[in-house]
Amino acid sequence: MFVQIFSTGGTIDKLYFDALSEYQIGEPMVDELLRDARVGFDYAIESLVKKDSLELNDADRELIHTSVAACPHDHILITHGTDTMTVTAAALADIDDKVIVLTGAMQPARFRDSDALFNLGLAVGALSTCQPGVYIAMSGKVFAADGVRKNRVAGRFEGV
Amino acid sequence: MFVQIFSTGGTIDKLYFDALSEYQIGEPMVDELLRDARVGFDYAIESLVKKDSLELNDADRELIHTSVAACPHDHILITHGTDTMTVTAAALADIDDKVIVLTGAMQPARFRDSDALFNLGLAVGALSTCQPGVYIAMSGKVFAADGVRKNRVAGRFEGV
Amino acid sequence: MFVQIFSTGGTIDKLYFDALSEYQIGEPMVDELLRDARVGFDYAIESLVKKDSLELNDADRELIHTSVAACPHDHILITHGTDTMTVTAAALADIDDKVIVLTGAMQPARFRDSDALFNLGLAVGALSTCQPGVYIAMSGKVFAADGVRKNRVAGRFEGV
Amino acid sequence: MFVQIFSTGGTIDKLYFDALSEYQIGEPMVDELLRDARVGFDYAIESLVKKDSLELNDADRELIHTSVAACPHDHILITHGTDTMTVTAAALADIDDKVIVLTGAMQPARFRDSDALFNLGLAVGALSTCQPGVYIAMSGKVFAADGVRKNRVAGRFEGV
């Protein structure tokens, strides 16, 4: 299995800039996380966008769609902000010849108690075992892309 | 999905005792890891054994087998030392009505750069999506239990 | 040595609220950090304020001054945001019978690569060995309170 | 302040070798820790020995003594195993023109809850403020080298 990874920003990649006393989205953390994970598969990472997912617009989703559709590989992992992850997943629903899994994090990967590393593992588990289609791997569950929503108050994804 | 977790020791649970200048196996780390992971499923954890997997004997594997077979739940996660993970997996092969996933870690979960959290995510991904059977989730891959070995020199699991 | 610790907020205590996609100041991290540090001295922690130090006002500094002056102990550790740490230190300059050390962090203590734990150690080292007076322990150095400024661009404290 | 750092092994530098199911002493962690600490002083690191401190012999201590005595810098930080830290400190007692601070860790620096980063901060605090002499910075305290012992059962250093 070769995994093509597209990063789009989101909480998972957030770091803290003291000079601004605020967060910003940094370089994709996924490579560092996969090295910690000591994975035995090959992968490539391409950073498409670096945005909070609330700020992703139609042009960004067009770029994500084009990149996934044009990708010669069958296993696609997308790291993404959680707030509009389902919107992007829906926009990819017509691509039916690839296993596409979106994941992200509720806490930045740079945090000691982040869910990022677990979520990546969950997403890779889904990539390894699912049929072609679009999935969201969050909150310890693998959801079909059209059967999930983020419960913002509870801080987790749940089936609909 | 309700997940019954059985812990059996192994590197994932190792801590460091200064007074002995050596490692020992501590309490199961899986609960702390799943809380970091902010999972949305329910689970229970039972500690069956606390051993390096090289020290597991027939009686230990008998206990593991009995516990899994008697469990009323369909999704079983076993944390286990890596050196004889395939042996225990083989001993469970006759249980064909449950999804059983074994995982562990090459580096103790207490390490900053451990693979433990990722591996747990990978195992939960497999639990969520696999048919009944016995699987090993390690090195970023989900293996059928009879199609994998640990390459001790390379420090990873690979297909056979 | 008994150490009275006053926390006032700042980056060291920042956590990330997904529901708001932003940082907020959480409970003081100093107790958790000192337990990791396995310190052999006794201490008490009192949370005086929970603010970014840019938002501290005269009333806050009055409260800090009163609390330090009234404290029956000789060794005072103050965790504080970095942007106005020198201002608060100056406001304490008239208290000359105690060793007072201010410290904080450029990266939240919850980050894996935070400077918080080191800075606390540095501050305790200063508390243990300095004469009464007000000190700032940051950037690997112990400064007299009136001989230091924060270089915001470089992201460190330096002598003046 | 320029700090010359000599590493000699010990728990602080221990890593876990899966292939042996045991600990071994790795490369010095001090550089990575000081980068997390974002220190503003210059330093150099020289690895003299890589041993559990119970295994240090007279020749090792001779090498440490020679290296410290010959060093052109005034501020010397030594990372060292905890079990015989006081023995090495005693062997350096005749060097009276430098500030020499020994520190180490009860838990490997690679652990998430290690005391290593705090202890380094404590040692740097002592280096910054102490008169020439030999000191041990452990358990949140700065000890004169001849006034401290390790309480192995309690897992901490205490005054004698």
Image (cartoon, coloured by chain):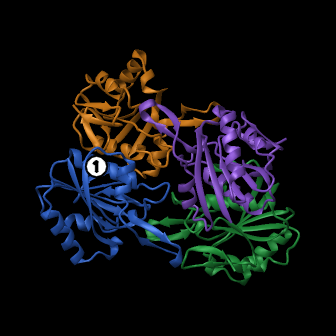
Chain colours: A blue, B orange, C green, D purple
Q: Give the quadrant of residue A65.
A: bottom left
Q: Could you say where residue B67 lies in the image, as x and y percent from the top left? A: 39, 24
| Observer able to see residue D87 | yes
Is C158 above or below relative to A101?
below
Q: Could you say where residue C130 lies in the image, as x and y percent from the top left? A: 81, 63
| Observer able to see residue B19 | no
Q: Chain of mark 1?
A: A
Kindly identify which residue carries mark 1.
Answer: A124
Q: Could you say where residue C12 lies in the image, as x and y percent from the top left? A: 60, 66
Toward the top, the furthest residue is B58
Q: Residue at x 18, y 73 (%)?
A: A62
Q: Could you say where residue A43 lies in the image, as x and y percent from the top left? A: 25, 53
Q: Secondary structure at mark 1?
A: helix
Which of B17 and C71 lies nearest the eye of the viewer? B17
Quadrant for the C terminus of chain D, please.
top right
Neighbour tally class for label 1: few under 14, some 14-19, many 20 plus, Cα within 10 Å: many
Q: Residue at x 67, y 55 (%)?
A: C31
Is B43 above or below relative to C150?
above
> As shown in the figure, which amino acid type bears the numbered disc 1?
Val
Toward the bottom, the furthest residue is C58
Is D66 above or below relative to A23?
above
Quadrant for the N terminus of chain D, please.
bottom right
Left-right relation of C86 to B49: right
Q: Residue at x 26, y 36 (%)?
A: B158
Which of A145 and D33 lies nearest the eye of the viewer? D33
Is B46 above or below relative to C86?
above
Left-right relation of D63 to A134: right
Which of C81 and C106 lies nearest the eye of the viewer? C106
Numbered-mark total = 1
Left-right relation of B12 to D153: left
